[in-house]
Amino acid sequence: MTGPSIARRPEEMPDRAALIAMSGLEYLEGLLAGHYPHPPIAEVMAYRLVRVADGEVAVRATPGFNHLNPMGSVHGGWYGTVMDTALGCAVATRVPAGFWYTTLEYRVNLVRAVPEGTEVEAVGRLRHGGRSTAVAEAEMRGVADGRLYALGSTTCMILAG
């Protein structure tokens, strides 16, 4: 995986107070620029943030052998984690300083199996960003061929620091 480093120990992660002191967009831009390490799960699930804008993010991921289920196909939890990341980060782009968010619910519909070793991009887009709730949608498509692999949505709650 290229780009920003991956946090290896808890002390390498920004603390909660530092995160809440900046807007979600500021944090994600800093993460993309390499000022903050990616969370450890990014390495475990083989994804990375590749684009950040107001109300939209893109996450690229490539499932490997470690992401296969007992049947030899990519585990549904891998899709869920990558999609939840794109969805949540899209919401985060509109979370102001002094606030944080948490997922109330998310849904992922698998359209077709992602073959092991296939790079995909999950693009999350904010559809509603209110004072107390936010809604986002995402698509996961193949980078090389644009094939649709999954669709998803989330509802998040916005909370004061």
Image (tube, grey):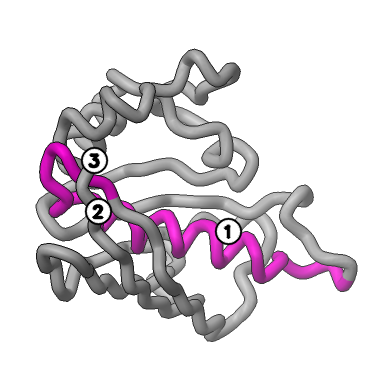
Q: Residue 155: horizontal and vertical position, in percent? A: 33, 73
Could you say which is closer to the camera, residue 11 or residue 90? 11
What residue is rendered at 20% in x and 42% in y? 24
Name the image quarter holding residue 117. bottom right
Location of residue 128 in the rendering, given as x and y in whole percent from the top left corner: 15, 73
The mark closer to the camera, 1 or 2, is 2
State the residue lying farthest toward the right.
70
Q: Which residue is mark 2?
A: 159
Q: Mark 2: which amino acid?
A: Leu
Q: Mark 1 or mark 2, which has the lower sequence index?
A: 1
Q: CA distance from mark 3 to mark 2?
A: 6 Å
Q: Quadrant of the C terminus?
A: top left
Q: Which residue is mark 1?
A: 118
Relative to 79, is 156 on the left or the right?
left
Sequence-wise first label, 1 or 3: 1
Residues shaded magenta = 71-100
Q: Residue furthest top?
A: 11
Which numbered marker is on residue 161?
Answer: 3
Q: Residues within 10 Å of mark 1 (few under 14, many from 20)?
A: few
Please say if the residues under marks 3 and 2 sit with CB atoms less than 8 Å apart.
yes
The three-letter code of the residue at mark 1 reads Thr
The foreground one among 14 and 125 is 14
Quadrant of residue 55 within the rendered picture = bottom left
Mark 3 neighbour class, 10 Å CA radius: few under 14, some 14 to 19, many 20 or more: few
Residue 131 position (above or below residue 5): below
* Left or right of 56, for residue 143: right
Question: What is the x, y in percent for residue 17?
Answer: 29, 26
* Label total for image: 3
